[in-house]
Image (cartoon, rainbow, N blue to C red):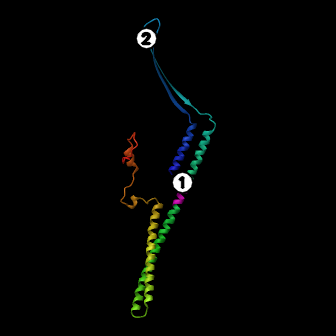
């Protein structure tokens, strides 16, 4: 959006080459002089003020070419802005879909973990009365471990998808996340150096 604003102003700057220019020209002159026949000294004070209007008629056509070029650049920047908006919308939709899919995957793996825990308890009870072998118990334990790993993976995917959505909408910042870190504020830096008319040192002394 800033690039579009810059290109629009550049068009106006280029069009300014065709506008007339009005200038005020002033002159003040004071002189002293004498005559050969008398000792009197004469003093002369003169002043003039004029307005000068310059109207460009034809300067080779370069100004017109520059205006057309600036307008083409403005159209290009507007197309880039539309493309960037479409890309952001697509990224947000994709990230939101991944986040919703991760939520569904968490619910599914939680049910899978619950089922594996119930199955393991049942196999243990059957093994206690001699109806299952130790290998059956180990297989049930492995199934439960796999379900828990899948649950942790789904939870990880949801966290990543959530931060991806925040990044896509421009909210992945220390202020939104509440991080305990110092945030650079350009306004503060501006007030620190705005009165420095000379020198090369920055506010921290370097």
Number of marks in the rendered image: 2
Q: In this view of the protein, which residue sits in the foreground, 132 or 44? A: 132
Q: Which residue is mark 1?
A: 81
Q: Mark 1 or mark 2, which has the lower sequence index?
A: 2
Task: Give me the C-alpha separation between circle 1 and circle 2.
Answer: 75 Å
How busy is the neighbourhood of tag 2: few (under 14 within 10 Å), some, or many (20 plus)? few
The location of residue 85, given as percent across then percent down, is 52, 57
Majority SS type along the magenta span: helix
The location of residue 108, given as percent across then percent down, is 46, 77
Query: Which residue in the rendered view is the most extreme toward the right?
Result: 60
Q: Is residue 157 above or below residue 44?
A: below
> What residue sits 43% from the left and 80% below the top?
145
> What residue sits 47% from the left and 71% below the top?
102
User: In the shown orientation, is residue 191 left or right of residue 24?
Assistant: left
Q: Which mark is residue 11?
A: none
Element class at badge 1:
helix
Q: Is residue 5 above or below residue 61?
A: below
Query: Which residue in the rendered view is the most extreme toward the front?
Result: 206
User: In the shown orientation, is residue 45 left or right of residue 11?
Assistant: left
The location of residue 169, given as percent across then percent down, is 47, 60
Q: Are marks 1 and 2 in contact (CB under 8 Å)?
A: no
Element class at badge 2:
strand
Query: Which residue in the rendered view is the most extreme toward the top?
Result: 37
> What residue sits 40% from the left and 49% below the top?
186
Q: Which residues are magenta?
A: 83-88
The location of residue 88, given as percent across then percent down, is 51, 60
How busy is the neighbourhood of tag 1: few (under 14 within 10 Å), some, or many (20 plus)? some
* Residue 45 forms part of the magenta stretch: no
Q: Which mark is residue 41?
A: 2
Q: Is residue 87 above or below residue 6?
A: below
* Residue 86 forms part of the magenta stretch: yes
């Amino acid at each position: 959006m800033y690039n579009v604003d810059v290109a629009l102003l550049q068009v106006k700057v280029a069009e300014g080459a065709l506008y007339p220019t009005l200038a005020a020209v002033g002159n003040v002159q004071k002189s002293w002089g004498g005559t050969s026949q008398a000792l009197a000294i004469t003093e002369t004070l003169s002043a003039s003020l004029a307005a000068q209007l310059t109207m460009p008629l034809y300067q080779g056509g370069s100004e017109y070419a520059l205006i057309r070029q600036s307008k083409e650049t403005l159209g290009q920047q507007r197309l880039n802005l539309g493309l960037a908006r479409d890309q952001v919308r697509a990224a947000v939709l994709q990230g939101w879909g991944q986040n919703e899919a991760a939520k569904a995957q968490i619910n599914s793996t939680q049910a899978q973990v619950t089922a594996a825990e119930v199955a393991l308890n049942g196999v243990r009870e059957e093994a206690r009365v001699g109806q299952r072998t130790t290998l059956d118990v180990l297989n049930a334990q492995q199934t439960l471990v796999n379900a828990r790993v899948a649950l942790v993976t789904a939870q990880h995917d949801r966290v990543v998808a959530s931060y991806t959505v925040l990044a896509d909408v421009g909210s992945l910042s220390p202020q939104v996340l509440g991080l305990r870190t110092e945030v650079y504020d350009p306004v503060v830096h501006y007030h620190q150096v705005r009165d420095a008319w000379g020198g090369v040192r920055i506010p921290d002394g370097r």
